[in-house]
Amino acid sequence: MREFFIFAVLVLCALFSVLVTISILGVLVTETWRFFDSDEVTVRGFLFGTQWNPLIGREKHFGIWALISGTMLVTLIAMLIALPLGLITAVYLSEYAPRRVRNVLKPVLEILAGIPTVVYGFFALMTITPVLQWLHDGFNVYNALSAGIAVGILCLPTVCSLSEDALQAVPRALRDGAYGLGSTKFDVSVKVVLPAALSGIISAFLLAIARAIGETMIVALAAGSRARITADPRDDVQTMTAFMVQMATGDVSNFGVEYYSMYAVAFTLFVLTLGLTMIGSIVRRRFREKYE
Amino acid sequence: MSNSVPESIDSTPPVAPLREGRGRVRLNVAFFTICLATAGMSVLILLLLLWSILSEGLPYMSRTLLTSGPEPVAEEAGIWPALAGTIWVCGLCGLLTLPAGIATAILLEEFRPRGRVGRFSHGLIQLNITNLAGVPSVVYGILGLTAFVGMFGLFHSSSFEIGVTYYDQFFSEGDQAILVPIPHRDAPLTDAADGMLAYDYEMNPIDVNVVDPGDPLPDDEALLDYTLHSDAEAGRIDHRSWYYLRLPFGRGVLAGALTLMLVILPIVIISSQEALRAVPSSLRDGARGLGATPWQVIWNVTLPASIPGIMTGAILAMSRAIGEAAPILIIAGIVYINRAPQHLMDDFTVMPMQIFNWTARPQEEFHGIAAAAIIVLLLILLSFNAVAVWIRQKLQKPLS
């Protein structure tokens, strides 16, 4: 009898996590519904509009693409740094590194992964931006490039550790076979092991992109608060997450359209990251090579 | 017969293309160099990060920083309220998360169902947790704002409270505070009257001396302290004790802890699952063979064997919670907090929030103390990780 009791308690705890997901969806969907219900917003204007200024004067625009463009610019810069560096570091750790180097490099990557994101934001604002401004005059104090670089450094350990797991999972037999055929270490690493671990690597990439999209503190400190569509990394942009922070910390009257716009942006963000996470899981499971 | 085509003296052997012969060797060496350089770049970046923070922050490290609250002048500002807030919020969060997370992990790992419905729900819960781990922390902040701070709008403001007493406060003609208890929160403001129950600021009962507006005031200083005009107006204040609770939770410590719990719960579950999975099944089978029920096996064999792994995961999750600023930002906003939290519903701030606050200001000195606060935060996190590594090594017994 006691066993059943304990089992019931455990099941309740597990159901709590399901409850969390349902609440997230419920809250976001209801408040987004209220957002679209108000007079100033239309679904077409939201999905296809290109201006986002919910606070300025009489003309309020709610086109989400301005915010998505900011997020995409920062994410793109971050991925240009994190993906190549992370992957090559993973290849080095998995194929080349002697044990002493591993014992230094792995803790370094763990430390980089464990540093709070505010610290990266501080680093972006205090160190990266002055260097960029010294290199070229056109950089604004808030610019997308320094935030992108910091987000890239943040995601680098994620890419590296997940890719390294995928590379390590490739059985030795494949490598030995390639060596037997006369390959150099480069041939083995890049032409045999990498393609074999490709599903895990792609899944790592997608997870890193999801993480970069959801990053808040770095962009809130370093990227700026002007929502607009631009491809110039020297400009200040506003990402979806930075907008949510701006709404939550400003004195916006409760239950106005601006307040609900925060929920609509949160919903978009949630859908994007959830989609990326799920596609990553599917890719990893569906395309995993069967080695036996 | 040798070939009599003369070779020009300064001809060089043809460059091997990258696809064959010595070219492949060169490509190999070049790639190795690239790998080494890339790996070294990570170390370089970390060193650069640490150097920039230390160089900005070390000049500002002082005792004032650790013990005082935020001030308008940077030299006198401190992180004590933020530090206390972090201890309150993250301690409470850990107390809430660890039991729930470990329980879920036990259910998912030890009670694997065999029927089709059971397997389907097991897979669903597992998938759900993996997806929750990837949700950005701002979304959890928004959920916490709606669910814990505002309670989905189900309660009007402060509709249920315990642990609070309300007073009407007068200021006497001698500029002393006089407190009059009132029966309940919605009672009308009291008028000054002779013989009413009144206390001074230290809660000593006093006799109030009420004079009409036109009469002369007494000369005695002590009497003046307790003199009120009959038309004096009171303001309503409340005294909240340490066990103050109210529904809805409002922007307090409890709401912050619950929101952080949402953020780190998937991490705790996933790492506990891995720790439980690492216990070899021979231990479990042996216990079952001796006649133990499933729960006895878990409680007496599996859990003790997986404690090091679970503790490591829990400490890493707490490190993440200490460093999280985004959900707290959404819940609490930017508020001026100058003391440690006094009760569960009190306003609070945490270290990352204070760092964010100071970094966002234009003055250079605030950047300096922000860097000093970062140093304190990193030291805390470093000690947490060192404890995790120490536990992992100390308690690591070979299990089979």
Image (cartoon, rainbow, N blue to C red):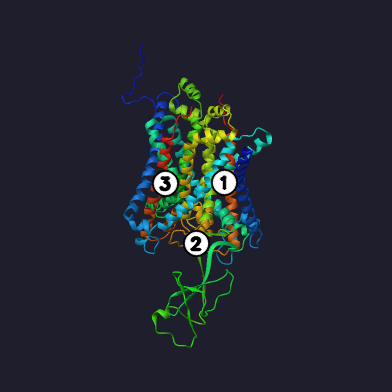
| Percent position of residue A91, x then y | 45, 33
Which residue is under mark 1?
Answer: A273
Residue at image position (46%, 57%) is B349
Mark 1 nearby-residue class (10 Å; few <14, some 14–19, many ≥20): many
Viewer-proximal residue, B212 or A188? B212
- Locate residue B122 relative to residue B256 in the image: left or right: right
Which residue is under mark 2?
Answer: B241
Which residue is under mark 3?
Answer: B381
**Is there CB contact under 8 Å for labels 2 and 3?**
no
The disc labelled 2 sits on which kind of residue?
Answer: Ser
Residue at image position (49%, 29%) is A193
Secondary element at image label 2: strand
| Residue that lies at the very extreme toward the top in this rendered image | B1
| Percent position of residue A198, x then y | 53, 33
Chain of the residue under the numbered disc 1 shown in the image: A
Chain of the residue under the numbered disc 3 shown in the image: B
The answer to whether dots 2 and 3 both sit on one chain is yes
The disc labelled 3 sits on which kind of residue?
Answer: Leu
The disc labelled 1 sits on which kind of residue?
Answer: Thr
Examine the rendered structure and indicate whether residue A84 appears above or below residue A22: above
| Percent position of residue A66, x then y | 55, 55
Can residue B148 be seen at all in this image of the molecule? yes
Lower sequence index among marks 2 and 3: 2
The answer to whether dots 3 and 1 both sit on one chain is no
Q: Find the distance from the CA under tag 3 to the CA under tag 1.
A: 28 Å
